[in-house]
Image (cartoon, rainbow, N blue to C red):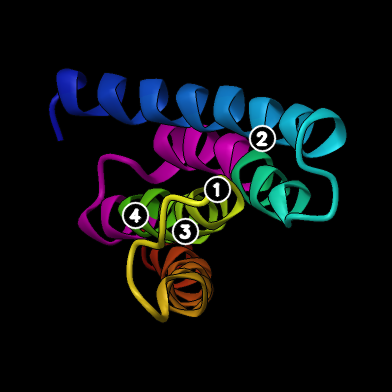
Amino acid sequence: MTVIHLQILIALGCLMGAAGVALLAMGAHSKPGAGLESAGSMLLFHAPAVMAATFVLGGFPLGFIAIAGFILGAGLFAGDIALRAYGRGRLFRYAPPAGGVILIASWVLLALAALLI
């Protein structure tokens, strides 16, 4: 991976953190009980994982794929919940569980990447 690719991953991790805080605030103030707390937490849990994994394993193909999975999985999970909370439909029918499966697979892949470096 080039430095630009790694910088983009770090920036995406930072944006995930910001979106997580925003969703937690919206869940507390404008839409309590709509699931935004779960969506915000999912983003906040994975934002530092994206950044840390980028520093340690971002230059390795398996590490990069796992990091991309964190971003995609958390985005699917949180995005679908946020869209439903604000009455804008959904991403697609099984977006949250698909995001969860992608996140689980990404954690396993990241463990594998760590063992193979």
Element carrying mark 1: helix
Q: Earlier in the sequence, mark 1 or mark 4?
A: 4
Quadrant where the C terminus is found in the figure: bottom left
- Is disc 2 in contact with disc 1, using a CB cutoff of under 8 Å? yes
Q: Which residue is mark 1?
A: 82
Question: Gap in Å between the C-alphas at discs 1 and 4?
Answer: 28 Å
Q: Which stretch is magenta?
A: 46-66
In the visual, does 60 lie left or right of 52?
Answer: left
Residue drawn 17% across the image and 19% down it: 4
Local crowd size for mark 2, using a 10 Å CA cut-off: few (<14), some (14–19), many (≥20) = many
- Is disc 3 in contact with disc 1, using a CB cutoff of under 8 Å? yes
Question: Gap in Å between the C-alphas at discs 3 and 1?
Answer: 5 Å
Q: Is residue 56 magenta?
A: yes
Circle on res. 23 = 2
Residue drawn 42% across the image and 80% down it: 94
The amino acid at mark 1 is Ala
Question: Gap in Å between the C-alphas at discs 3 and 4?
Answer: 26 Å
Secondary structure character of the magenta stretch overall = helix
